[in-house]
Image (cartoon, rainbow, N blue to C red):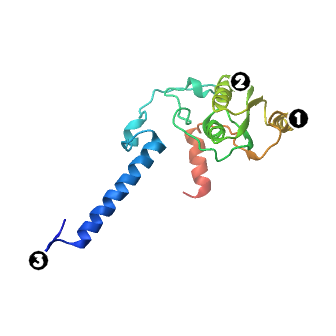
Amino acid sequence: MTRHKDDGVSRRAIVGGAAAGLASSLVSPAWASATGSADPPVPVDPTTKYPKPPFQKQSQPWPGLASKMDPRPDHGETSYKGSGRLAGRKALITGGDSGMGRAAAIAYAREGADVAISYYPSEEPDAREVIELIRQAGQKGIPVPGDLRDQGYCEKLVADTLNGLGGLDILVMNAARQQSPSPSSTFFLISLTGR
């Protein structure tokens, strides 16, 4: 506290100290009720939280399974906590078994949406994991395996989603194929862009 030359403690110091004490007494109970703990969280350095390269060389035939990767990718299986932002919504996510589609399916379910996922039939083990995570979030999960290159399957996918979920609010067109280019194709792409 600052002292005034003549009379000891200044009014500003008294009011400032009282305000800080009042704010502290109000924040602590609110923090404790929101987090279940009176202590604020300890920051975690994200650069030390996850696995780091070098990783072992690994290859799978297309389309591959996330469950066979080492280390396994983090799609939010244990880290993502929802807050009900999509309560009552119904979502269809193509490629919902792995990668960004899997992360979206988990997040949407934890935000309160029922979720249908499409995936290539050989990705069934990964898709089963995602459907189980959707159900653990208390939501309806619908697996619809098939090949998006087939128009008949695409029509069935939408019909099964509408029937299974009772509607459709959100469509995430995520399905894709990832492959590593050969060095010569990389050079060709660079040449086309002029870089």
The residue at 73%/29% (across/down) is 120
Q: Residue 122 got which mark?
A: 2
Q: Residue 152 got which mark?
A: 1
Q: Residue 6 got which mark?
A: 3
Amino acid type assigned to the residue bearing label 1 in the image: Gly
The quadrant of the picture occupied by the C terminus is bottom right
Question: How far is the residue under mark 3 from the one under mark 2?
Answer: 84 Å
Q: Quadrant of residue 81?
A: top right
Q: Quadrant of residue 46?
A: top left
Asked if 32 appears above or below 143 in the picture, the reply is: below
Question: How far is the residue under mark 1 from the one under mark 3?
Answer: 90 Å
**Residue 74 vs residue 120: left or right?**
left
Asked if 16 appears above or below 173 in the picture, the reply is: below
Front residue of 176/102: it is 102
Total numbered badges shown on the rendered structure: 3
**Residue 144 vs residue 98: left or right?**
right
Q: Quadrant of residue 141?
A: top right
Q: Secondary structure at mark 3?
A: loop
- Residues at marks 1 and 3 touching, judged by CB atoms closer than 8 Å: no
Q: Secondary structure at mark 1?
A: helix
